[in-house]
Image (cartoon, rainbow, N blue to C red):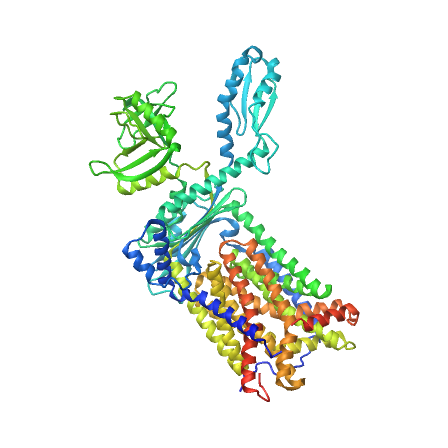
Amino acid sequence: MLQIDLWKRLTIWALVIVGLALASPNLFYNKVESHNDAVAAIEKSGATPEREAAAASWPSWLPSGLVNLGLDLRGGAHLLAEVKVADVYASRLEALWPDVRDILRPERETVGTIRLQPSPAGELRVRISNPDGMARALELVRGLARPVTSLTGAGSNDLQVAGQGDEIVVTLSEAEKQATDERTMQQSLEIIRRRIDEVGTREPTIQRQGNDRILIQVPGIGSAAELKDIIGTTAQLTFQPVVSRTTNADTTPGTGNELLPAMNEEGAFYVLEQAPVVTGEELTDSQPSFDQNGRPAVTFRFNPSGARKFGDYTAANIGSPFAIVLDDEVISAPVIQSHIPGGSGIITGNFTVEESTNLAVLLRAGALPAGLDFLEERTIGPELGQDSIDAGKLATGVAFVAVLGFMWASYGLFGIFANVALIINIGLIFGLLSLIGATLTLPGIAGIVLTVGMAVDANVLIFERIREELKTARGPARAIELGYEKALSAIVDANITTIITAIILYVMGSGPVRGFAITLGLGIVTSVFTAIFVTRLLIAMWFERRRPKTIEV
Amino acid sequence: MRLRVIPDNTSFDFFKRWKVWLGISGLMIVLALVSFGVRGLNYGIDFRGGTTIRTQSTEAVDVGAYRDALGALGLGDVVISEVFDPSFGPDQNVAMVRIQAQDEAEAVTPETISAVEAALQGVSPDIEFVSVESVGPKVSGELVWTAVEAVVLSIAAVLVYIWLRFEWQFALGAVLALVHDVILTIGVFSELQMKFDLTTIAALLTIVGYSLNDTVVVFDRVRENLIKYKKTDLKEVLNLSINETLSRTFMTSFTTLLALFALFALGGDVIRGFVFAMIWGVFVGTYSSVFVASSILLWLGVKRDWSKPEAEAEAKKNGSSV
């Protein structure tokens, strides 16, 4: 029992050393963090002297994984958003109307006149004046349906078409709704991710939760409201032909036209053709810039089809104004001076540098496919986070010293073995946390403190058992052996049950609770490891050297 | 000289009045349930929706002035409380403002928050809002269910595990002890009207884990002694087992409490409720593993014939699976 194979000894020490090495960067948190940031920045946008210097401040051959600090420790914002996926159904169906009209029009003989009816959400209702032609009309409209392209919806069509009296009712099939939801969510996640990345903050968490929710956590941002501004703003950019300019807000724009206010001129309005020449969806890039007078501006570039449309339009309309419209406001309405081929241009307005930067970000990221409802939002100030870290450090330190002292007083030398194991244990927890890139939260610190208290349990079980065995067993070596042997089943049962609760906490919990579950769970694993292997090895090494006739535990 | 709080070879008779202990526990459970029924829990925004704002200012907190400023906004139920903590600096005056979920809103309304912030700035110009948390009623409803599910699920999982490792009487004893701990903790929270939120659930589940840890250690010894002393009265075996593990029970509870009290005193006010729940849990958990779980085991009786081939084989396997 006390004979431990050499390879086992080496494995135990190797695990301890690897664990402690992984934990070591956390002792130099700020230095390593600036090193990591600099490395990431160099990778992303090239090296600068400062970045090189920051990167060199921590040797690259050392481990550089850090425990992430949760929002409650670092400060930042947390949002839980629900994507209104049903919004997309409506626009899908709206877009279907021209197709329905075009397919029925040649059959006017049988179906009569076709008219779009006011439709409740999620339906497209079309009335035909000749109900006898309903069968034919339904057949034609059904012909518009396409197979659903998704794994789960394979084999079904995207549209459901039914006749009700003289009305054709088109709805999306369940399979299509699911496929649409899936696309909407993917798109929303992508857009939110891009918008947040544009702002350049460290390690944001953007996660899908359940069917239609997105969890967004951004450390270091001032407030949840700021975060909402970044992700929630939908920038719809269009280029529309100008019909006229007016200062009368009550002007009737006429069919196919609309009246929109100018962004920077008080009381000015433009009558624009409703159908845009090009929309922001065809933008490929947009950057903040300055115009020839040094005023902040935004440059943009279209994709090939957008560039062609824009080129054709400018070629055909030299001398007439066209409007750049952002979110139903006219940013500017320059006169086309010349044919603009190549599909790039510049928007000038009375921007500040910040506004032009934000506008470029918004244009680049595109519009969210559906609206967001914010179900939960939390802002934690950095001061509060720092206070919590300080308090947590102090409490952990005091708890640590108290437990170490108590163990020493109770078990003497064996207590010191347990204490060494406890110190290694804490190191291993941090090593594992850094390795898996887990997030440390305030309840997580509580989990560690609790582990400090509970980690000695396995050792206590063993030592108490050794004490008992000393009364009956033949000699100290045998007592130690039996102590380990007999305490094992209690240790295993006790820790498996605790780990069951830690796993359930992790699965069911979110945010801070999950952070607690992680440290508790890892703490159980490391404390069992240190108690069963590390202290045993320490005792075996001591025993081999001293060969005591009697021991006192 | 070693510190020995629990002397070796104790022989307390824990089961002389086991019916009394069960009766006391039963009474405590009834009291806890009555308190829960009458006073109810002081749910945090996690469970009932709403907004909490933590403010910090250099001038002293005037709860009355805050209330007057916010009352004008017509936000319904607004709770303002000043927070004290020894770790605060001299110019650090902290208050918590809690606003109920607004009726019409499924989600969170930023307008409400900015209105509240503006009103408080009117009272105390240098006020800072160090944390603002809002939970919409939709999410809070779900969180309640998730929390209940988590607690029930973990107790069920434990029931199954102990059943597999021991006998059903052990499983039932352990689970009733857990239910006892959970109910008493909820009772304390309702009686003291302490804030009950998601982290309290985490504390509750830790208590479940801790109490179980204790119970399992005692049960493990009971199983061992049942095999060792086949003819001894069950009550004697239980008593012996508890006495033998008493020193360990005390040591572990004490070291855990040392750590928890450090956290309670120095960990800051943000997690004080959480730590309080755990301290309470260590006490009731330790009590329940001795007096509830084992008493129930005594009450139910347990299979004594552990010499069956399978039982023997299992005992051997447990002993030698090192």
Q: From what the image shows, is residue A99 above or below residue B158?
A: above
The C terminus of chain B lies in which quarter of the figure? bottom right
> In this orientation, does residue B59 appear?
no
Task: Pick whichever, A173 or B204, lies toward us.
Answer: A173
> In this orientation, does residue B320 appear?
yes
Residue located farthest toward the left when viewing the structure as drawn: A293
Residue located farthest toward the top when viewing the structure as drawn: A109
* Residue that appears at 21% across and 36% down: A292
Left or right: A384, with A468 as reference point: left
Q: From what the image shows, is residue B273 above or below residue A231?
A: below
Q: From what the image shows, is residue B73 above or below residue A409?
A: above
Q: Quadrant of residue A148?
A: top right
* Residue that appears at 59% across and 29% down: A157
Q: Position of residue A437 (x, y in %)?
A: 47, 58
Residue located farthest toward the bottom when viewing the structure as drawn: A549
Residue located farthest toward the front when viewing the structure as drawn: A7
Q: From what the image shows, is residue B246 above or below residue A266?
A: below
Q: Position of residue A229 (x, y in %)?
A: 38, 43
Left or right: B192, with A304 as reference point: right
Q: Quadrant of residue A398?
A: bottom left
Task: Pick whichever, A452 or A180, lies toward us.
Answer: A180
Q: Position of residue B99 (x, y in %)?
A: 45, 49
Q: Tally the marks.
A: 0
Q: Position of residue A91 (x, y in %)?
A: 48, 29
